Image (cartoon, grey):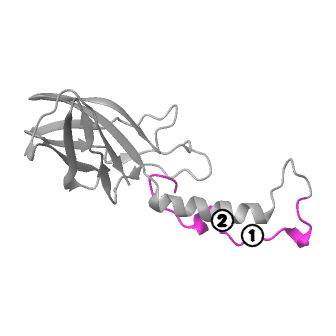
Amino acid sequence: MSLPGSASASIYGGANLFDYAGQGVTDPTTDRSASAVNPLVSDVAGMTHTAARAWVQFTPSGTASPALTAYDATWNWPGNTNAEPTVARNSTGLYTITWPVSVYDAVPSGAPGYAGAITLSFRSCASSNVYASAEFFRTYIAGRPSANSVQVAIEAGGALTDATTVSFDVWFY
């Protein structure tokens, strides 16, 4: 499995490779040394546990539906048909961002390592505070309605607000 899931070094063949018969690299155009591959496998597996998996930027529109300004995710590769996230206004200052329940990674169907649909399950989320137009907006994660969604709250002056002049960022881990 690859991102957005988590992996261990064993998924990538392990991080305990040794060069054949202690010979080192025979042909540098086709071979890699175990001393280069082992740390790579270990690092990649470790990053699947801590790296951000997705990011959303949205702009509230008062009482109207917020605008999805930009987004990206570890599974959004050219040619993938994954659905984009949705952003909905629940009430004043409360918004829900929802990703599809499952997505496809960059490994094409029929290729070795193809995993099929991967169910999203974010471990954590984070949002950014924004200072714009001489006003400070505090954002925080207000809830996790499901494994693939998050509720974001926006405050200004200690009260929930529908800011309309700035965009907000949310990261999914």
Please name the predominant secondary structure of the magenta segment in the image. Answer: loop
| Residue plotted at (86% across, 68% down) | 20
Under mark 1, the amino acid is Leu
Q: Position of residue 170 (x, y in %)?
A: 31, 44
Number of numbered tags placed on the structure image: 2
Disc marking residue 17: 1
Left or right: 32 in relation to 167: right
Per the rendered image, the range of residues in magenta is: 1-25
Under mark 2, the amino acid is Gly
**Which quadrant of the figure contains the C terminus?**
bottom left
Where residue 135 sits, quadrant-wise, is top left
Disc marking residue 9: none
Q: Is residue 134 above or below residue 140?
A: above
Left or right: 49 in relation to 28: left
Is 131 in the magenta?
no
Left or right: 49 in relation to 8: left
Please name the residue that numbered disc 2 is placed on: 13
| Residue plotted at (92% across, 58% down) | 26
| Residue plotted at (56% across, 62% down) | 45
Q: For mark 1, does the 10 Å Cα neighbourhood hold few (<14), some (14 to 19), or many (20 or more) residues? A: few
User: Which residue is farthest front?
Assistant: 134
Question: 51 or 19: which is nearer to us?
Answer: 51
Where residue 104 sits, quadrant-wise, is top left
Q: Position of residue 17 (x, y in %)?
A: 75, 70
Is 4 in the magenta?
yes
Question: 77 or 169: which is nearer to us?
Answer: 169
Q: Position of residue 77 (x, y in %)?
A: 51, 37
Q: Do callouts 1 and 2 mark residues in contact (Cβ within 8 Å)?
A: yes
